[in-house]
Amino acid sequence: MRADTDTIDEFVASDYKYGFVTDIESESLEPGLGEETVRFISAKKKEPQWMLEWRLKALRHWEKLECPTWPHVKYPPIDFQDISYYSAPKKKGDGPKSLDEVDPKLLETYEKLGVPLHERARLAGVAVDAVFDSESIGTTFKEDLAKAGVIFCSISEAVQEHPELVRKYLGTVVPYTDNFYATLNSAVFSDGSFVYIPKGTRCPMELSTYFRINAANTGQFERTLIIAEEGSHVSYLEGCTAPMRDENQLHAAVVELIALDNAEIKYSTVQNWYPGDEEGRGGIYNFVTKRGICKTNAKISWTQVETGSAITWKYPSVILKGDNSIGEFYSVALTNNMQQADTGTKMVHLGKNTRSTIVSKGISAGRGQNSYRGLVQVGKKAANARNFSQCDSLLIGDRCGAHTFPYIEVKNPSANIEHEATTSKIGEDQIFYCNQRGLETQDAVNMIVNGFCKEVFRELPMEFAVEAQKLLDVSLEGSVG
Amino acid sequence: MSTVATTDPATTPVEAFAQLEQNGVELMPLRKAGLARFSESGYPTVRDEDWRFTNVKPVAELPFHLVLVPLGQAIGQEQLTSKTFDQLDADRLVFVDGHFNADLSQIGNQPSGVTVTHLASSLAGLEREVGSLSGGDDNPFVALNDAFFTDGALIQIGDGQRLAKPVHLLFVTTAGEDGEAAHIRNWIDAGANAHGTIIESHLSLGKAATVTNVVTESRIGDGANIEHIKFQDLSKRAFHLASLHSELGRDARYVFHSVALGARLSRNNLRLRLAQPGIECVLNGLYMLRGQQLADHHMIVEHAAPRCDSHEYFNGILDDQSRGVFHGRILVQPGAQKTDAKQTNKNLLLCDDATANTKPQLEIYADDVKCTHGATIGAMDDDSIFYLRTRGLDAPTARRMLMHGFAGEIIERIRHDAVREELDALVWDRLEAEHQLH
């Protein structure tokens, strides 16, 4: 308990420690969205013709769409013409060949965020792709990974170096017509990570991407594509932060996972975008589409810890297409102050003997609104499908809200679907008990919350689990009084 | 003119309104507003979130046929004997195609302070009340009902009074033509500490694809204790659209049961507002479907005051290509502390082609609450069957036992003994006769 208390003291002064701005010369596109914007981004990335055409198709489709209003979140309409769709740190000459040539200021930024990009970080044993605004600034451990045949690079690089793979898989799980924000992303996505694990390979280290929004008035639209060939295995981590600003910034990402026969992908997110201040000024709008497809005997596991963002709106999903495939979703979503979250998952059972597990823990404090929205769908041919869903909500304070909107659609009688949900608050008796044992109220709350989330934290890689736990403590600071 | 038929309700001829005006000129603003609302919205489609799984296109495609005065053919008492609840010791109000039939009805001596009659007979003083509880609803069928309702039950129980006998509202359709529609409006007003049991049943005497569109508004006073049992066993071609709007008083007890066995498509909207402390409310339902049937229960229980309990239990047995739909939303408003809300929906799929869609939702804005929901969908539990077989039962018997138990769970909650026993026997026979186990 001692260590946790220290952590809290550490943050009493500033609630959001990642709120600094890096003063770096950057090249930004004027706000506005149109064909020129898309052409500019595509040209900037020196993309082949097919990529540009795909983007333009998406743009034309997007122009026909209307912004969805069904999520249980409130925000003023977004002026999509008032956003800059491209911002990147200015490069000298042709840009850095290796990390050694990267602007030291950038490296410093990541150092400050606790993400070491230098190879001396070998000890950490995690390969990192660092994305700064619209550009990937570098990827570590590339050579080591290449030895194992693993491709880990930015998606822009993949379009240049491995166009056949990108072309084969991009948009196969989340088509450009999927939804409003995914379509927008398809048109203007700037960067993101690309992972390819060859047949039968177990990726030798954890892969990770760290997203950082720095420039003001820009949107971040990253696109991640992970392909796990037959019998391969990969664990991938994602982290995100942004500076404190008074205006809202848009982050609309798309993540596509492809797990071929017998492959396994584990995708973990610790999302800590700037959540806005106590009055709800500023913060990131996090509107993300994440989906994976499982072939025969494959497994995809999503784990997410969502503590940041003014609004979170995402449903990491799994299409269980192959027989015996497995989908998992573990989530902790915390909303404090004026934060809003509408998050959950979709498990689409198509193959036989498919299984899915959903464990969602929502914590609402302050005036936060937290919704779980999930779909479990069992197709006609999905014999013996099995799903277990549990969504628990914890309320701290009497001005917050916790909501559950599950959808269950079953077309096969051999399916076995269970859904449970509970809503509770931290009991006064629990706090009293802890107080009696000499624990401060805030420590008691942290302890209870961590216990509440244990099932999810257990799924996170160890480094992340520690970070996630600290994050929760910090985010809850001052919510009990 | 006995009936008026058009293709689109929005273009109903003016004669229809002239006819309806005779039922009470004061209701005309409500009727006109209802028609205007419907003209604006039209029939709901599956694109509307509330109608996502229930496609009412077959209703929209029927000719729109209003039965403004009773149809010619007389119905004899003998046609109603042997129907459900015929032997029940109860006051009976019979409505034929939405019109009260005095010959078939029997109303005994209820205590003074209790009124049991049909709405059209005593609208005076109620013009402002009718529509006041259903008014906020954007359901297009409520709008249609506002515009065209012909009659329905009026039950008023004064403060501290109790119904001497249960009141049985029997709605029959005789129509011989597809699309003939009965728009029925019930008004129930139970005063403080009133007691009573109300039974509502819907049966078909004809085979046509008729439509019944029922809106029931009930105001249950402080400390009142009311049990309402709804039994729907219409023909397999009929369409049934119903909506209940209930406002409950402090410490009121309200138990509503829905047994949906008939109709090609039935939809029950249940809207309960718990705006006073200490209310206890139970919604309990059973649907048993086969063939192409669809039954949809769509409820919103709004907790707007502290210390209220609401419990929902819905079980469905789905055979052939039938579809069971459940939408339950518990809404806990800020300040509704100490709420205890529970929601359960269980579905038993007997056949490969049956479908269940369930959406048990919680929307909670208060922290000191206990809210749970659970849903299950699946075939019969193999472990339970195995257990029974180890006790010496053969597999078919074990399955039958489990199925009866599954339905019995719901029937058991009916408090009125005679009604419970009759429905228990009926459900048992129906399961034995119609749902052969695979």
Image (tube, coloured by chain):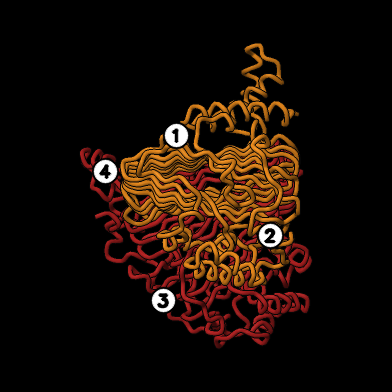
The residues bearing labels 4 and 2 have C-alpha atoms spaced at a distance of 67 Å
> Looking at this view, is B303 or B337 the one in front?
B303
Q: Residues within 10 Å of mark 3 (few under 14, many from 20)?
A: some
Give me the residue at 53% from left, 48% from top. B360
Give me the residue at 61% from left, 84% from top. A33
Amino acid at circle 3:
Val
The residues bearing labels 3 and 2 have C-alpha atoms spaced at a distance of 78 Å
Q: Nearer the viewer, mark 3 or mark 2?
A: 2
Residue pointed to by mark 4: A428
Question: Residue B70, how many percent across, how many down?
Answer: 65, 53
Q: Chain of mark 4?
A: A
Colour chain A appears in: red
User: Same chain for the residues at labels 4 and 3, yes or no?
Assistant: yes
Q: Nearer the viewer, mark 4 or mark 1?
A: 1
Q: Residue furthest top?
A: B392
| Residue B79: quarter of image | top right
Q: Chain of mark 1?
A: B
Chain that the image shows in orange: B
The residues bearing labels 1 and 2 have C-alpha atoms spaced at a distance of 35 Å
Question: Residue B22, how many percent across, how many down?
Answer: 55, 64
Q: Residues within 10 Å of mark 4 (few under 14, many from 20)?
A: few
Residue pointed to by mark 3: A21
The residues bearing labels 3 and 1 have C-alpha atoms spaced at a distance of 77 Å
Q: Residues within 10 Å of mark 2 (few under 14, many from 20)?
A: few
Residue contact at pointers 3 and 2, CB within 8 angstroms: no
In the displayed structure, A431 sits above or below B398; it is: below
Residue pointed to by mark 2: B2
